[in-house]
Image: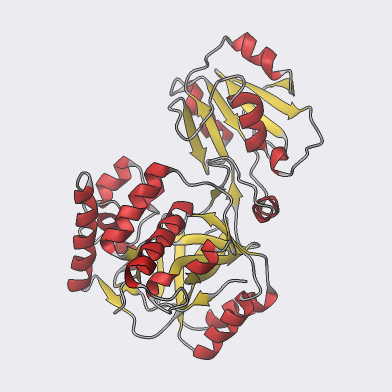
Amino acid sequence: MVKISPLKPFLPKDPEEFCTNPYDIIGKAEEQQLKKIPHSMIHLILPDGEGDQKYQNAAKVYKQFQDNQIITKETLPSVFVYRQESDQFNQQGLIVGLALKDYEEGNIIKHESTRKKPLYDRINHITSSHVSAGLVWTIFKANKDINYLVKQIKKKKPIFDFKKYNYRHLLWQETNPAIIQKLTELFKKEKVFIADGHHRAASAAEYRKRNLKESNASKESDVPWQYLLSYIASDDQIRILSNSRVIRRLSIDDKEFLKKLEINFRVLPMEKAFNPEKKNQIALCLKGKWYELITKETRFDLLRDSLDVVVLQDKILNPILGIIDPRADENIIFLGGIQDPNEMEKYITERGNDLLINLYPVNIQDLEEIATAGGVMPPKSTWFDPKLLSGLVLHDLTEK
């Protein structure tokens, strides 16, 4: 159901030095440290400057990287296999171009809405720099034929093999037209879901739309800006962690809050910090005291409504705490990827916040089913881990 394409991207000469985390999870302290490294990807994805100047600076940095051969262009159409390894977890997927026409037509399926401010930022970045600098993480349902070809590609020696952020990162390059064609044929039968990178995908689609209008090119033309830089992985190769919430200040008295919770939940005091062990069980830490919440409702009209992130929004955040838009509300902090409940507890006991809501992770099959049905999940519903490095492959959008 989707069209994939090989790429002729820029690759870094020194990926260990060059590559970074995705721009949207890099905090200010990490950004400042990375900017001490002259040849770091950070200067491209989070450029210095204010207003439009920072986007102009991104374009300058991108050209400097090319001129100084910090990155070099591949001449052969290629697909790549990217693998991350640690003692706890391994994952791998393909890096390819995905046809943005399929994104526009709904064959690349979304599960979250985009927000105006970050979308505006990424549109300005891509239209100024003319490069897709970060991977859009997509998934497909496990397919033994595709996975077999991935194994075949991995029989070669990887072109990159280095350690960063507690993971070993390996990248294999495949230029054999026969293997690329087999992959292309197989993906024609696959649905693809966006896991992470909705704003990067939407900005690339907007860039394509503007180019189609300005160039009068065919929607079928085979040029770089018709394709989305994507990491596409089998759904048995991913891990979703919880994306828990911290509420800085409760707007009501503790006793009143607990009483209101009892309308929709069984509220059980607990002796110590814990993680939920199943869906519709929520772990809550109120000013240092832990409670187990179990939803009283057991039947839901829609699968989406059964998700704990939806239950949280509909039964607690909105009606009790008055948090209508969690993305925009400054009273909420998201704790993506933290697995140790004792570490989460420190946000209450050591950092002076009032409430921690520790959620069970969303199931990947639930995500696929909801997205297929056209459902939109609440913001920050998932935390895919480990994050994909930015800078392994840079997709130049110009027609060179």
Q: Of 38 and 197, which appears nearest the observer?
A: 197
Residue 180 in sight in this render: yes
Image coords of residue 133 (percent x, y): 35, 62
Q: Which residue is drawn at 65% across and 39% down?
A: 360
| Residue 208 occupies quadrant | bottom left
Q: Which residue is drawn at 46% across and 63% down?
A: 168
Residue 213 versus residue 252 in the image, above or below: below
Q: In this view, does 78 lie to the left or right of 56?
A: right
Q: Which residue is drawn at 43% across and 78% down?
A: 221
Q: Is residue 100 left or right of residue 36?
A: right
Image coords of residue 81 (percent x, y): 50, 73
Residue 157 versus residue 213 in the image, above or below: below
| Residue 306 occupies quadrant | top right
Please state, as top left, top right, bottom left or bottom right, where the C terminus lies in the image: bottom left
Q: Of 244 and 33, which appears nearest the observer?
A: 244
Please state, as top left, top right, bottom left or bottom right, where the N terminus lies in the image: bottom right
Image coords of residue 88 (percent x, y): 57, 55
Colour scheme of this structure image?
secondary structure
Residue 277 in sight in this render: no
Image coords of residue 23 (percent x, y): 37, 51
Residue 82 versus residue 178 in the image, above or below: above
Q: Among all residues in the image, which is located at the extreme right? A: 299
Q: Is residue 187 left or right of residue 201?
A: right
